[in-house]
């Protein structure tokens, strides 16, 4: 599959005109047929008969006696008022100083009625329209419900659970980066797939190891259904996968017929010095000859607007989005209408340029936090004239440092889970990020929340524990 090597975000592409499912999307063509990827349970699930008819309520002239919605006049909430900081003004976390400019938004009338009522399984339509516009500007993709569709979830974790549940039967093979985001492991463990670990390095997924796995795959065993990857600021490694590796992953997906689950919660927290690599969905969309689309992308506002609002969204082939929506209609009906409307009001008020200004502000903030944390790392783990206690690579995105302790048995688990706690510091042993639970000398620390004085003291305590273990060996 030939691929363009540039990020063609195409802001001048045609505008999104509608979000209603096109009849063309349901035609049984080879490119629309994803049935070979789906779990048996997915074929047994149907959309709630009432929820399946809800979109018809928008039909002009149609009188709906359909849904048993509560009468909105009985809700005691008249309006929702939120106060925002203007993104183009000074911020309280900024080192430049100055007073923030506060702006008040009032959500009332029809908008507050939308916030308080049941809504569509795939999200509030106006909110989905804004997200579709964002995906066009950020990734150059058009949400037309023929090639790509978008759905809103209760955070990307919710969507991740749903897509894995829709894809995997017990024993199915799935490729996962190793180490992998720890939050995905409980999902996969209950589905009982065959989790195949793909090695990573400071630049993300190892193409050589991925190719080796696939080239040597047993002939009598079905190949993996999907690859799960976190390409920007990966949790836990902090790695950002470069363009060349992303292109190779797409080629291997085409050659070996697997999906790419692009989980990208740190996409907006890129603060590297090099030009940002395009996303998998951008690269696939800019291919000269697009065959069957293989990328399902998960985005999240948890790291940039509010983690408590629980807003994520998935973009991908309509067949895959449809089965996720069917799961949602049975599991939780929809994502929270109220937080969707709050986010809608914020993004309407800011516009895309205001949102990007906000992203620039917080990226600068986290870059400074990273730099200060790394300075403390050097101070305590690579002291001048002393023996290095750890090795690491500086992250260019995300919230984490992933570092290898220079300990004799190369096993950080006992050290972190016992000695470090006794020494007054809490970190995450690397073992919990491997599906196999294999031994590793790595540790994950977060630099996002803690003041640098406390971080410095925490690293001092951890370094002392590591030094004591090394000297006592």
Image (spheres, helix red, strand yellow):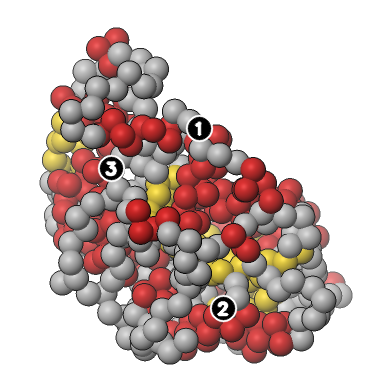
CA gap, disc 1 to disc 2? 33 Å
* Residue at the (72%, 82%) spot, across then down: 213
Which disc is residue 48 wearing? 1
First of labels 3, 2 by sequence position? 3
Residue 350 visible here: yes
In the displayed structure image, the side of residue 282 where residue 390 appears, left or right: right
- The answer to which of 381 and 252 lies nearer the viewer is 252
Say which label, 3 or 1, has the lower sequence index: 1
**Earlier residue among tags 1 and 2:** 1
* Residue at the image point whose x is 24% and y is 22% from the top: 63
Residue 329 in the figure: left or right of residue 403: left
Residue 273 lies, in percent from the top left, at 34, 81
According to the image, label 2 marks what residue?
253
Counting labels gives: 3
Q: Residue at label 3?
A: 125
**Mark 1–mark 2 CB contact (< 8 Å):** no
């Amino acid at each position: 599959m030939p691929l363009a090597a540039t990020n063609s975000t195409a802001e001048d592409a045609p505008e999104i005109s509608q979000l209603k499912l096109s009849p063309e999307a349901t035609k049984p063509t080879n490119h629309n047929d994803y049935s070979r990827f789906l779990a048996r349970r997915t074929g047994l699930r149907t959309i709630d008969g009432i929820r399946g008819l809800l979109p018809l309520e928008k039909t002009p002239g149609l009188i709906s006696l359909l849904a048993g919605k509560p009468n909105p006049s009985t809700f005691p909430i008249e309006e929702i008022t939120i106060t925002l900081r203007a993104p183009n003004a000074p911020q309280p976390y900024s080192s430049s100083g100055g007073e923030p400019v506060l702006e008040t938004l009032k959500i009332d009338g029809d908008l507050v009625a939308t916030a308080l009522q049941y809504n569509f399984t795939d999200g509030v339509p106006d909110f989905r329209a804004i997200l579709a516009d964002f995906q066009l500007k950020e990734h150059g993709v058009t949400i037309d419900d023929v090639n790509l569709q978008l759905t809103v979830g209760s955070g990307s974790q919710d969507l991740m659970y749903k897509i894995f549940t829709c894809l995997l039967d017990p024993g199915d093979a799935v490729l996962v980066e190793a180490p992998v985001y720890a939050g995905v492991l409980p999902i996969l463990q209950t589905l009982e797939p065959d989790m195949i670990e793909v090695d990573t390095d400071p630049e993300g997924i190892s193409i050589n190891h991925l190719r080796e796995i696939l080239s040597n795959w047993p002939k009598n065993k079905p190949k993996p259904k999907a690859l799960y990857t976190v390409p920007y600021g990966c949790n836990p490694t902090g790695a950002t996968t470069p363009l060349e590796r992303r292109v190779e992953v797409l080629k291997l997906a085409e050659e070996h017929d697997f999906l790419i689950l692009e989980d990208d919660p740190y996409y907006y927290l890129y603060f590297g010095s090099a030009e940002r690599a395009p996303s998998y969905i951008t690269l696939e969309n800019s291919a000269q000859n697009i065959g069957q689309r293989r990328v399902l992308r998960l985005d999240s506002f948890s790291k940039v607007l509010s983690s408590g609002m629980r807003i994520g969204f998935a973009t991908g082939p309509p067949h895959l989005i449809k089965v996720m929506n069917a799961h949602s209609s049975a599991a939780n009906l929809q994502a929270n209408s109220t937080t969707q409307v709050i986010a809608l009001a914020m993004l309407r008020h800011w516009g895309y340029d205001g949102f990007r200004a906000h992203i620039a502000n917080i990226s600068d903030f986290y870059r400074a936090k990273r730099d200060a944390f790394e300075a403390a790392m050097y101070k305590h783990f690579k002291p001048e004239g002393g023996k290095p206690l750890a090795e690491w690579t500086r992250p260019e995105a995300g919230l984490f440092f992933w570092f290898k302790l220079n300990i004799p048995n190369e096993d950080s688990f006992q050290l972190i889970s016992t000695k470090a706690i006794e020494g007054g510091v809490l970190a995450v042993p690397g073992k919990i990020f491997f599906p196999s639970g294999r031994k590793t000398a790595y540790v994950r620390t977060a630099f996002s929340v803690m003041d640098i004085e406390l971080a410095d003291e925490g690293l001092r305590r951890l370094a002392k524990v590591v030094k004591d273990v090394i000297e006592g060996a």
